[in-house]
Image (spheres, grey):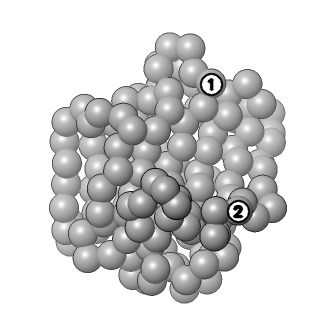
Amino acid sequence: MRLCCYRRSLPLPYLDTIPGGMRQGKNIVVKVTIKPNPTSFQINLQCGMCNNPRSDIAFHFNPRFNEQAISMNTLRDTKWDATDQRHGTNFPFHPNGAYEIMFQCEQHQFKVALNGSHLLDFKHRLPFQNISALAVDGDCVVTEINYQ
């Protein structure tokens, strides 16, 4: 069941509440097109919408083009945890590419799918029930957001 859908180019940085908050079984689908000369972009599942002091970020998903890596982390009490970085010869993002990134909330982790195929898992470091906002920024254009 689709809870909410936004279909338009959204201005970045994007920050908005997640309708109904986060719960086990919820999917968040973010469709993006990568800009021509990207450095990075990030999608954050946040525990609030504050900038000063910054809200906790339960899941920071950050593809980095110059490193050909996906960096993942958690920000708690304005401090970053240890970074989990996935390198590989098959970095899945490319300039000008269009992608559908799905975050599926499970009991102990997020499953991330890219264009319908499993990409990675990220174990919860903060209670997923505290997640209330979605933020996107960086070298991409957001074309659609779905909450399911």
Q: Quadrant of the N terminus?
A: bottom left
Q: Residue at x 57, y 21 (%)?
A: 38
Q: Amino acid at mark 2?
A: Lys
Is the residue 83 above or below the residue 111 in the image? above
Quarter of the rendering containing residue 3: bottom left
Neighbor class of circle 1 (other Cα within 10 Å; few <14, some 14-19, many 20+) is some
Q: Quadrant of the C terminus?
A: bottom left
Frontmost residue, 61 versus 132:
132
Which amino acid does the dot numbered 1 rest on?
Thr
From where the camera sits, is residue 110 visible? Answer: yes
Does residue 13 appear left or right of residue 138 in this picture?
Answer: left
Residue topped by disc 2: 79
Q: Secondary structure at mark 1?
A: loop
Name the N-terminal-most of marks 1 and 2: 1
* Residue at the (36%, 35%) spot, across then down: 12
The answer to whether the residues at label 1 and label 2 have Cβ atoms under 8 Å apart is: no
Residue under numbered circle 1: 39
Label number found at residue 123? none
Q: Is residue 147 above or below residue 12?
A: below
User: Which label lies toward us, 1 or 2?
Assistant: 2
Give percent across and percent down for residue 56. 55, 67
Q: Which residue is at 41% across, 67% downward?
A: 48
**Residue 61 percent location from the top left of the image:** 59, 51
Is 90 left, or right, of 145 in this rendering?
Answer: right
Label 2 packing within 10 angstroms: few (<14), some (14-19), many (20+): few
Determine whether, in the image, residue 43 is placed left or right of residue 30: right
Image coordinates of residue 2 in percent, x first then y, are 20, 66
Residue 102 visible? The answer is no
How far apart, in angstroms, are the residues tagged by discs 1 and 2? 23 Å
Q: For the point 72% across and 60% down, which residue is it? A: 80
